[in-house]
Image (tube, helix red, strand yellow):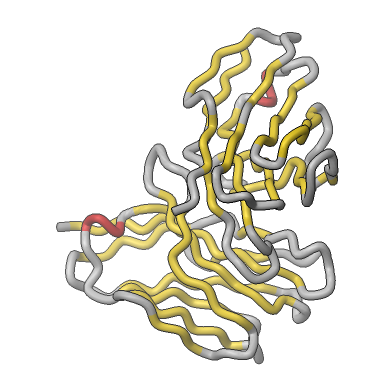
Amino acid sequence: DVKVTQSSRYLVKRTGEKVFLECVQDMDHENMFWYRQDPGLGLRLIYFSYDVKMKEKGDIPEGYSVSREKKERFSLILESASTNQTSMYLCASSLFPGSSPLHFGNGTRLTVT
Amino acid sequence: GESVGLHLPTLSVQEGDNSIINCAYSNSASDYFIWYKQESGKGPQFIIDIRSNMDKRQGQRVTVLLNKTVKHLSLQIAATQPGDSAVYFCAENIKGGSYIPTFGRGTSLIVHP
């Protein structure tokens, strides 16, 4: 079974802080994704990566960046956290996103005060 | 832009009833569809998928129906159980693009014992 692990379940940060959200998958998937989930808005794609050191913007990349130095690890970075970035963040990985499902972690609930 | 949507944000059923969750999609180029289940405090989990060359696919107690004529997808759950209570998302993958799945907003299924 694919395991996608997000390092923190809950985080509380202050406005202006730099925040790192870490995600690791154990199935050698090349494709990894970061989504945020807000009530009534579903899942919105922030960034994705098809390979090491490769990244592509999703639908809502503003205020975020990512890092993929190793195949198994995909990090989401909030350069200067703001209160509107309070949300549930979900990491996912996939073998072939066009023909196989995504495997999600259990999410990180981030609160920015 | 084109998007995936859900007809019913909340569906309440009695234990033992059959449940039907609907999803409309607007992109005729979509060729792979997935249903996910998200329980409270967890990330979305894959339930069942279907490709555009199929009309129906069955799993254990679940069936997905695809009507390409009207761009409609449904998830049927037989003999619904309290453990089926969750939020259900449909997602579509668009052929020829970057194969990034697009998610609907989700519908909440509540099963009453």
In the figure, is residue A40 to the left or right of B69?
Answer: left
Q: Nearer the viewer, residue B106 or A98?
A: A98
Residue at 61%, 11% in the rendered image? A13
Q: Residue furthest left?
A: B113
In this view, A104 is above or below B56: above
Residue at 77%, 79% in the rendered image? B29
Q: Quadrant of the N terminus of chain A?
A: bottom left
Number of callouts: 0
Residue at 56%, 46% in the rendered image? A40
Q: Position of residue B70 (x, y in %)?
A: 64, 87
Q: Quadrant of the C terminus of chain A?
A: top right
In this view, B77 is above or below A64: below
Q: Nearer the viewer, residue A87 or A99?
A: A99
Place residue B3 in its image quadrant: bottom right
Place residue A98 in its image quadrant: bottom right
In the figure, is residue B62 to the left or right of A61?
Answer: left
Place residue B111 in its image quadrant: bottom left
In this view, B65 is above or below B87: below
Residue at 30%, 75% in the rendered image? B61
Q: Position of residue A25 (x, y in %)?
A: 57, 42
In the figure, is residue A88 to the left or right of B82?
Answer: right
